[in-house]
Each structure stands twice: as structure tokens, then as C-alpha cells.
Amino acid sequence: MTRLLKSFFIALIALIAPSCEDKDADATLDFIGDSLVAGWDLPAYFPSRIVQNYGKNGATIDYLEQYAGSFAGRIVVIEIGTNDCRQMAPQYVDTYSRRYMEAVIGLGAKKVYLFSVLPRDLVNDLPDVNSYISTFNEIIKQKSKEYTQITYINVYSNFLQHGSPNPGLYKDGLHLSPAGYEILSAALIKAL
């Protein structure tokens, strides 16, 4: 009888274990991107989730490409692109947007929450930088519809005030204030 019970429990654990692993995987969010991700206090905004922060100051699309295949079967949140804003100029935007989407899909994630690139307001910015970013966001929004695993989260306009970046949402015209992170977090929670 003891052997039979032992065999039963081993079989039961074998059946339950995969479903527990799946639940843990679904509870985990991997965030990847530039300084906007690096500076995000993820545990504070997502206390019921296991969060991994792969944000890196100064990261560009090259950084995302380095992680090709690294997130297979995972849920990934991406906020990247502001450091590549020169690549969003009209003469480069088609090539860059293809590369961007290839990098996003190349991560291998089962689910991607992809944020729009946010408007910016730095002294040395190109005069039309936010126009470039807005056009790029529209391209990526359309391309995202081709992939069932991508949920595109367009928060660009949430960061504007009278057509310009809202200074109350930024520390310096690029990096976010707590109020800016509130907007990102609320949008992601709603999408989840």
C-alpha cells in the first residue's frame, strides 16, 4: 500500500508541476530597454509579479538585438528607442523600423508589451525629433498588428501638454519623473 501511495504522489506531482511552472512564468515580467526601464521601480509598481529589469542607460536597438532568443516562452515589456531617435528621420525610418521589429520578434517571447517611444525635449535634440518619433510610432503600431504576440501600448500623447512634452512628467526632458512612471505603469497594468 505504501508503494502504491508513493507512486500515486509522484504521479500527482508530475502532473501538477508543469502547471505550477506555467503560472510562475506568467507571473514573471521581463522588462528590457533603455534608461527609462533602468530607472523604473518595478517592484513598487508590480508587487504581485516577479519582475526582472534588463534596462540599460544609453541602450539602443543594438542592445535588444544582443538578447535574440533569450526570452523564449517569456512575457517581455519593452520600452526602447529614444536613443535611436536620429534613425527615425524620414530618410532612415523605413530601414530602422524593420530592424526594430526584427529585434522585438527576435527576443522569442511568447508575449510582448511594446511601448511607444516617448516624446522628448532636450536642448541638443533635432528640431523635428518629436515629429520623427510620432511617425515612427505609427509605423510600429501598424507593424505590431501583424504579430499576435505583441500588444502595442501607445502612451505618446499621454506625455504631451499643448503639443509639447509635459515637463511635469520628466526630470530633464528625457528621463521620467514619478508622475511619468505612474502613466507607464497604469497603461501596462491595463494591458495586462
Image (spheres, rainbow, N blue to C red):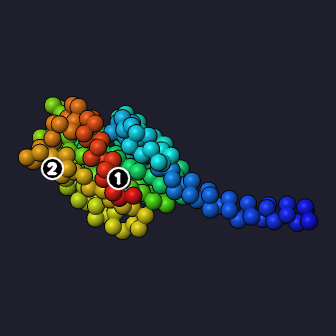
- The residue under the point 56% across, 58% down is 23
Question: Comparing marks 2 and 1, which lies closer to the viewer?
Answer: 1
- The residue under the point 25% across, 41% down is 180
> Which residue in the structure is indicated by mark 2?
131
Mark 2: secondary structure: helix
- In the picture shown, does residue 47 fall above or below 109? above
160 lies left or right of 56: left
**How far is disc 2 from disc 1 in space, using C-alphas?**
24 Å
| Other-residue count near label 2 (Cα within 10 Å), few / some / many at <14 / 14–19 / ≥20 | some
The N terminus is located in which quarter? bottom right
- In the picture shown, does residue 78 fall above or below 145? above
Q: Earlier in the sequence, mark 2 or mark 1?
A: 2
State the image coordinates of residue 56 (x, y, percent, origin top left). Answer: 41, 36
- Confirm whether residue 32 shows in the render: no
The C terminus is located in which quarter? bottom left
Dividing the picture into quarters, in which one does residue 190 lie?
bottom left
**In terms of depth relative to the viewer, which is nearer, 80 or 151?**
151
**In terms of depth relative to the viewer, which is nearer, 114 or 188?**
188
- Amino acid at the residue labelled 1: Leu
Q: Label for residue 25?
A: none
State the image coordinates of residue 118 (x, y, percent, origin top left). Answer: 24, 46
42 lies left or right of 7: left
- Amino acid at the residue labelled 2: Ser
- The residue under the point 34% across, 63% down is 144
85 lies left or right of 35: left
Q: Could you tell me if the residues under marks 2 and 1 are in contact, i.e. CB atoms within 8 Å?
A: no
- In the picture shown, does residue 16 fall above or below 82? below
Q: Label for residue 188?
A: 1
State the image coordinates of residue 20 (x, y, percent, origin top left). Answer: 62, 58
Mark 1: secondary structure: helix
